[in-house]
């Protein structure tokens, strides 16, 4: 379900960056969806119950400052790169070499400069969520990754 808002959307491109300002980026795409990832990798990388990302085409996302100096990447698992600022540690993006995701990049919504209207949202990898956190919102949940053909909560295949 997409929620409506009376808040005007900032004009494209959206701007964002790390806490200290050494790394900046822009996104030249609408942000219709957000994933709240509860996997243990995202929880550890963010130091939180989950990480919230928007997914955009790789060609619509670019670093505008710090890519050659302050931006660092960590391969958290084979083919998965997480980028962050080497100065302040802000997590900025996540990308995969996997065929399904190779043309996309996920970036942390919390690093946008301006507020955006609430996009469609869901929770993924809830089977490995933090034991101390209860998901109490109305957004769909998937025990693992959100395949297009899976139904929420149960993970059962749909036709």
Image (cartoon, grey):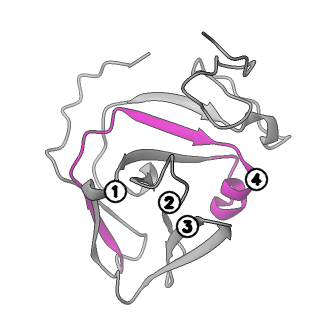
Residue tagged 1: 58
Label located before the other in sequence (2 or 4): 4
Task: State yes or no: discs 2 and 1 in contact (Cβ < 8 Å).
Answer: yes
Q: Which mark is residue 95?
A: 2
Q: Tell me if 28 is positioned left or right of 101 in this view.
A: left
Reply yes or no: does residue 101 show up in magenta: no
Q: Closer to the camera, 22 or 29?
A: 29
In the image, residue 40 above or below residue 139: below
Label located before the other in sequence (2 or 1): 1
Label 4: state its secondary structure.
helix
Residue drawn at (62%, 72%) of the image: 75
Quadrant location of the C terminus?
top right
Label 3: state its secondary structure.
strand
Reply yes or no: does residue 24 show up in magenta: yes
Distance from disc 2 to disc 3, alpha carbons, whole Å, reads: 7 Å
Task: State yes or no: discs 3 and 4 in contact (Cβ < 8 Å).
Answer: no
Residue at far left of view = 11
Residue 141, position as x, y percentages in the image: 65, 25
Residue tagged 3: 82
Label located before the other in sequence (2 or 3): 3
Q: Which mark is residue 136?
A: none
Quadrant location of the N terminus?
top left
Label 1: state its secondary structure.
helix
In the image, residue 10 above or below residue 33: below
């Amino acid at each position: 379900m997409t929620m409506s808002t009376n808040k005007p959307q900032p004009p494209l491109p959206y701007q964002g960056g790390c806490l200290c300002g050494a790394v900046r980026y822009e996104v030249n795409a609408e942000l219709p969806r957000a994933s709240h990832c509860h996997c243990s990798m995202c929880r550890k990388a963010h130091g939180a119950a989950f990480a919230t990302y928007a997914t955009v085409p790789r060609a619509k996302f670019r670093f505008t400052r710090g890519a050659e100096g302050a931006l660092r990447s960590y391969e958290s698992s084979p083919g998965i790169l997480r980028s962050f600022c080497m100065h302040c540690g802000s997590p900025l993006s996540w990308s995969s070499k996997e065929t399904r995701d190779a043309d996309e990049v996920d970036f942390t919504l919390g690093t946008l400069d301006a507020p955006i209207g609430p996009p469609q949202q869901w929770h993924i990898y809830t089977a490995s969520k933090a034991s101390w956190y209860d998901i109490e919102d109305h957004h769909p949940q998937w025990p693992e990754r959100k395949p297009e053909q899976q139904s929420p909560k149960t993970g059962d295949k749909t036709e």
